[in-house]
Amino acid sequence: MLTFAEAARRPEPEVGAELAQLAAHGAHGMLVPAAFEEAYYLNFNLPEQLGRLFSGINPARINEDTLEGLCEQAQQLVRTSVLINDAVQLFYRALGNAGLNTGTVHARRPGTRYAEEAAHVIPPGTAALHAVKRLWGRDWSFEQVLARLDNTGGIGIEARPTLLLAGPPGQPDAALAREYGVQTALVNHTGLVGLPE
């Protein structure tokens, strides 16, 4: 896990375009790499459990009522699985290093606007970890699973990085977007928190 300042010293392809731009503009936050999410899934054998859960779904004939119920179960499974202690401690240390272990923080995927907020984070940062897990669980919402079934014929998804930023989710600032030459700039009371598009 890297603070934005640490990530700024890495090549853009390694950390992603949005994070590189955020760091260049002085935003503060933390990158949770895709490998951390992947380890979470593998440590609890989530790919196999999710595969079994959705095994009765035929992509050519989807019963949407059945799929909706399975998606709720999948989200619950992803949100409630427990990280191994070493991973939790690594997350908490990185959160403290980034200055995100107190106050309000939000988690979102790079390049997207949807965020999960954790209000009233106190050390070590359990509320922030829960926000990350809720964000990961959203990958199993009915809309997202249905889109994957329609587009790929399967439910699988690759692990992706997660951004953690101070304050509540940002709101669009058209003037700042024009200044930076981007479509969307998100700001909150802490300053710039997103350049998602």
Image (spheres, grey):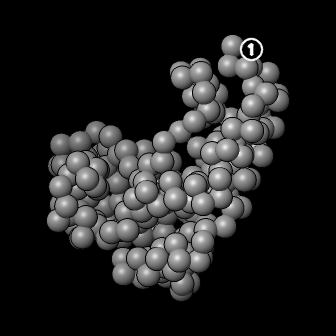
Left or right: 185 with respect to 141? Answer: left
- Crowd rating for badge 1 (residues with CA inside 10 Å; few <14, some 14–19, many 20+): few
**Camera-side residue of 20 and 87:** 87
Left or right: 185 with respect to 67? Answer: left
Residue at 40% x, 59% y is: 33
Does dot 1 land on a helix, a strand or a loop? loop
Q: Residue beneath label 1, please?
A: 61
Q: Where does residue 47 sit, x and y in percent of width and height?
A: 63, 45
Quarter of the figure that contains the N terminus = bottom left
- Residue most extreme to the bottom: 123
Q: Where does residue 31 sit, x and y in percent of width and height?
A: 37, 63
Residue 111 visible in the picture: yes
Residue 170 visible in the picture: no
Choose top left, top right, bottom left or bottom right for residue 119. Answer: bottom right
Left or right: 161 with respect to 122? Answer: left
**Camera-side residue of 56 and 65:** 56
- Looking at numbered disc 1 in the image, what kind of residue is underneath it? Arg
